[in-house]
Image: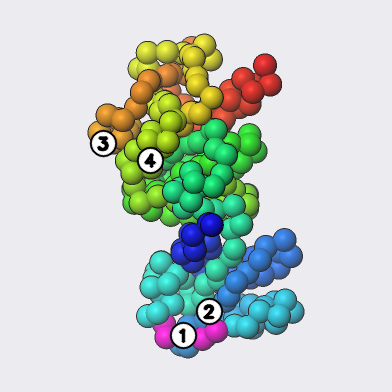
Amino acid sequence: MTPEISPKDRFITVYGRNPVHEVLLDPDLHVDKVVIADTARGSGLTEIRRAAGRRGITVQTAPAERVKKLAGNGRQDQGVFADVVAPRMLPLEVALAHADLRTVLVLDGITTPANVGMIIRSATAAGIDGIVVPRRGVASIDPLVVKASAGVAFKAPILKAFTAEEAVGALKDNGFHIVGLDADGDDDLFTAHLRDRVAFVLGSETAGHGPEVARLVDSWVSIPMTGGVESLNVAAAAAVVCFELVRRARA
C-alpha cells in the first residue's frame, strides 16, 4: 500500500497575483486551493476571485503572516498563493518502492531558478523517469522555476528528498549506478558504459558537486568540448545527458 504523501510533496505552491491568475485560467491544471491575505487590497484580486469562482474553487482568507509562511516567499507573494496539484511529484522513497525507475537526475547545489526550470523541461521531454529536486541546497519549485520550465514543472516526474546526499545514498542502496558529470571526468559521456539503472548527479556551475555527494559517485563522465570551450551551462549539459540516454535507449 502506498503511504500517505505530505501536501508539500503533492502540490507546487504558486504565489503572486499574475501567476495565481494564470494557473486558474489553465483548465489542464488542478488547483487545490487559493488563499488571499485578509489585508490584501488592490489590482488583480477581483480577477483571481472571478477565475476561481468559474472553476468552483473556494477562495480562502488567512492572516497575512500565515500567507507569507505558506507561500514561502514573503517579499513576493503579493498576499496570495495557490496550491497546484503536481500528479507525478512524489517523495523519492515512495517512487523507489512503487515505481519502475531506470533513469534519474539528481540536482546538487543548483540554486538558479532558470537552470532548475530548464533542466526539468529537458528531462521531462526526454522521458527521464525522475528528477530529484532536494528541499535543501537547490532552488525551490516556485513561479520562476515554473516559468523557465514553460509550465512543464506541474507535470514533471519530480522526486523530493531532503538533500542531494540523502537522495544519492538512497539511489545507491537501491542498485543505481551513480554517475557524476564533470569537465574532468575519466570517461566520455558518449562512449562510457552505463548500467540499466543509472542516476546522473548535476552540480552547480560555480561550486560543482558537494563533497558529501562526490564521495558517493561511482564514475565520472565529461561532455567532450572543442573550440576552446571549457564547459556548458548546467541546464545545457543536462539536456545533452538526457538525450544521450534517449539515443542509447533507441540504439
Disc 1 vs disc 4: which is toward the camera?
4
Which residue occupies the extreme front position in the image? 1
Q: Residues within 10 Å of mark 3 (few under 14, many from 20)?
A: few
SS category of the residue bearing label 1: strand
Q: Which colour scheme is used?
A: rainbow
User: What kind of residue is marked 3?
Assistant: Glu
User: What kind of residue is marked 2?
Assistant: Val
Give the image location of residue 13, x and y in percent.
51, 65
**Marks 1 and 2 in Cβ contact (< 8 Å):** yes
Give the image location of residue 83, x and y in percent.
55, 68
Disc 3 vs disc 1: which is toward the camera?
3
User: What kind of residue is marked 1?
Assistant: Ala
Nearer-N-terminus badge (2/4): 2
Give the distance between the C-alpha atoms of the residues marked 2 and 3, in whole angstroms: 39 Å
Q: Which of 27 and 51 is in front in this view?
A: 27
Q: Residue at x 66, y 79 (%)?
A: 57
Q: How crowded is mark 1: few (under 14 residues within 10 Å), some or many (20 or more)?
A: some
**Marks 1 and 4 in Cβ contact (< 8 Å):** no
Region of the chain picked out in magenta, as a range: 60-64
Give the image location of residue 248, x and y in percent.
62, 20
Q: Which residue is drawn at 48% across and 74% down?
A: 78
**Marks 2 and 4 in Cβ contact (< 8 Å):** no
**Which label was assigned to residue 62?**
1
Vertical arrangement, residue 56 with respect to residue 22, above or below:
below
Q: Residue at x 40, y 79 (%)?
A: 66
Task: Quarter of the image for the N terminus: give it.
Answer: bottom right
